[in-house]
Amino acid sequence: MEYLVYVSTAKRLMNEEELLDILTVARTQNKVHHITGMLLYSQGTFIQVLEGEKDNLSQLFKNIELDTRHKNVIKLMTGTINQRNFPDWLMAFASVNAETLQAFEGFLNPIDPSFLGSNDHVTANMLKIFAKANNLTY
Ligand SMILES: Cc1cc2nc3c(=O)[nH]c(=O)nc-3n(C[C@H](O)[C@H](O)[C@H](O)COP(=O)(O)O)c2cc1C
């Protein structure tokens, strides 16, 4: 199985309804294609972790790259995983700010290092990159 992390810029600031639209379709489709992951949105920027079988993942990423609701889609990380980091999430979602990111990091940090499984700490890295790219300092 593989994972892929990308960032992108919303064409314009998204309201709740638009975000919900993306999420509803994503969750329906992801169920069919056995894709799991997490989508974060903050101030016009998306970051998403996708995980699934190679073919499903590359097809989805092609679709996502062509989606006109965002631009500057940049693949940050991709690799192989033995087990999913988000087994229970067809697509977890959060609209985040500096405080929620801080809470995430605290949550992911030292207390339970096994939280993300034995593979790379994709999520923790992802959050750091996201925070840096968006100047979300705390
Ligand atoms: C930021 C963002 C994240 C998305 N995430 C997913 C996703 O996880 N799964 C998915 O199927 N579609 C996702 N989409 C929507 C796809 O780009 C596409 O619209 C959807 O797969 C439907 O494609 P189709 O109608 O050609 O089948 C996302 C779109 C955006 C803008």
Image: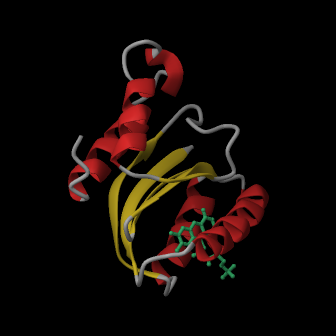
Q: Quadrant of ligand 1?
A: bottom right
Residue found 38% across the figure and 26% down from its top: 106
Q: Residue furthest bottom?
A: 68
Q: Is residue 27 left or right of residue 39?
A: right
Q: Is residue 104 left or right of residue 128?
A: right
Quarter of the picture holding the N terminus: top right
Name the quadrant containing residue 28: bottom right
Q: Nearer the viewer, residue 63 or 136?
A: 136
Residue found 58% across the figure and 70% down from its top: 59
Query: Looking at the picture, how far across and down is residue 43, in whole percent?
Result: 37, 66
Residue found 58% across the figure and 68% down from its top: 60
Residue found 41% across the figure and 84% down from its top: 11
Q: Nearer the viewer, residue 42 or 38?
A: 42
The answer to whether residue 31 is above or below residue 83 is below
The answer to whether residue 46 is above or below residue 65 is above
Query: Looking at the picture, how far across and down is residue 36, in whole percent?
Result: 63, 49
